[in-house]
Amino acid sequence: MSRIGKLPIPVPKGVTVKIDKTHVSVKGPKGELGVDTHGRVNVIEENGEIKVQRFDDSRQQRAFHGLYQRLIANCVTGVTDGFKKTLEIQGIGYRAEMKGKSISLALGFSHPVLFEAPQGITITVPTPTSVIVEGADKQAVGQVAAKIRGYRPPEPYKGKGVRYSGERVKLKEGKSSGR
């Protein structure tokens, strides 16, 4: 049995779960999220917990068992606590600032990069060298953070660019003169 798939998902107070044959909807204080199971697993709610069950022991069913358990657990976590990614900007003259609901990034290009947050995602800039991406949907938060990082990923010689908080960039040695 899948070690992840067999774990029950506790449903906190203030969260409502609606289970159909092929869809699970989770509604909480931070919004509403859903997962389409496409009928690949059986989802039940009992005693304040959500349980995911598979139909047989085939390899594909075992994979779907753990996958849908995690997707539903992420929905429950997202509507209660939300998800957050922090980005750090390193480099001389590299900075970020809020312009309305979008952010303006100065990343060494001849023009500022304007990025508007999609619906359901909030972006804050506490300091000019850090950007915080928050939202209920874990996949959307990660996608937005990756898109911002993709404008100027950290380069391997000086480490300048946009990186995730805590990300370590292995620096390469520069050219050495031929002796």
Image: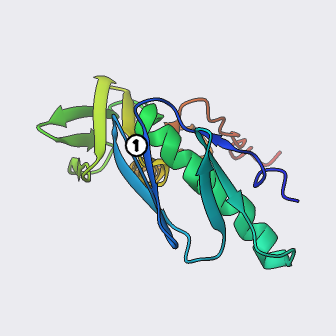
Residue 19, position in %: x, y? 49, 60
Relative image position of residue 49 (x, y in whole percent) = 62, 42
Picture residue at 46% right of the left edge, 41% below the top:
78
| Depicted 21 relative to depicted 151: above or below | below
Picture coordinates of residue 37 (x, y %)? Answer: 56, 70
The picture quadrant where one finds residue 171 is top right
Q: Residue furthest left?
A: 100
Establish if 114 lies above or below 103.
Answer: below
Specify whether residue 62 is in view. yes
Coordinates of residue 161 in the picture (x, y in percent): 46, 41
- What is the quadrant of the N terminus in the image? bottom right
Instruction: Identify the amino acid type marked 1.
Output: Ala
With 103 as the anchor, is 13 left or right in this view? right
Given residues 95 and 7, the one toward you in this image is 7
Residue for badge 1: 136
**Residue ID at (38%, 38%):** 133
Furthest residue toward top: 127
154 vs 2, nearest the viewer: 2
Q: Return the residue nearer the eye: 110 or 149.
A: 149
Q: Looking at the figure, which quarter contains the C terminus? A: top right
* Above/below status of 82 relative to 145: above
Q: Residue at x 70, y 47 (%)?
A: 175
Q: Closer to the camera, 163 or 22?
A: 22
